[in-house]
Image: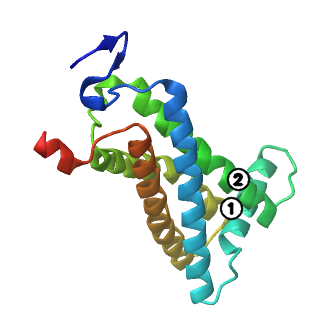
Amino acid sequence: MDRSLQRFSFAEGHIQRAPLARGMGWGLIGGLAGTLVMDILLMGALLAVGLPVSFCFSMVGDTLVRFFWLLGMHLAGGIPTGMLAHYLIGPLVGMLFGAALTLFPARRVDTIKKCILVAILYVEILSQPLLAMAPLLLKMDQLTVRLWFGGSLIMHLILAVILGSIVGYGLRLSPLSQRRTQ
């Protein structure tokens, strides 16, 4: 039974186009969850290699301090600034992702698997300018730059998989296995 009301379709129990606020809400949850899981795994990896668990937060904070210093603004840096940046940017990126999925109907993202793939592309591409600031502003050596980008690629991949899974679930996208049987 297909009952349509304006932009919303309730065919087969799935909402084909979710309202903007719903997409942003699930994006916020996905971005926050992805950031938390990414940071927990990152802290474990840093601890395993003998680095302080706050190393990444310190680098992010110091990069922001240097960036704002170039703009003529003085900011306290270090770990608190890095943590604040991480937990503002992650959920914000998630909200923008959720909003984009609900605003563009021609997206052809109709399964959770496609949502995860789109989230991976979105997060990895969007994070590159932010990640490039650290080696440029902190004058890292070549080995550190490689470790920075390699580690960031893996960590942001984790964030993207969680973000795509949560937003896909929240927007009631069907798993690929269900689509084949319908």
Q: Residues within 10 Å of mark 1 (few under 14, many from 20)?
A: many
Name the residue at the left extreme: 181
Instruction: Name the residue nearer the viewer: 151 or 133.
Output: 151
Q: Position of residue 105 (x, y in %)?
A: 33, 24
Residue matched to label 2: 85
Circles 2 and 1 in contact, beta carbons < 8 Å: yes
Quadrant that contains the N terminus: top left
The answer to whether 175 is drawn above or below residue 146 in the figure is above
Q: In this view of the protein, can residue 170 be seen by the observer?
A: yes
* Snapshot quadrant of residue 11: top left
Quadrant that contains the C terminus: top left
Query: Who's the residue at 63% across and 48% down the image?
Result: 89
Q: Earlier in the sequence, mark 2 or mark 1?
A: 1
Q: How many marks on residues?
A: 2
Q: How is the rendered protein coloured? A: rainbow
Q: Position of residue 122 (x, y in %)?
A: 42, 45
* Tag 1 secondary structure: helix
Q: Identify the amino acid type marked 1.
A: Val
Q: Position of residue 171 (x, y in %)?
A: 41, 37
164 left or right, relative to 99 = left
Q: Give the numbered dot on residue 60.
A: 1
Query: Who's the residue at 80% across and 62% down the image?
Result: 80
* Tag 2 secondary structure: helix
The answer to whether 163 is drawn above or below residue 1 in the figure is below
Name the residue at the top extreme: 6
- Marks 2 and 1: which is nearer the front? 2
Q: In this view of the protein, can residue 131 be seen by the observer?
A: no
Q: Identify the amino acid type marked 2.
A: Ala
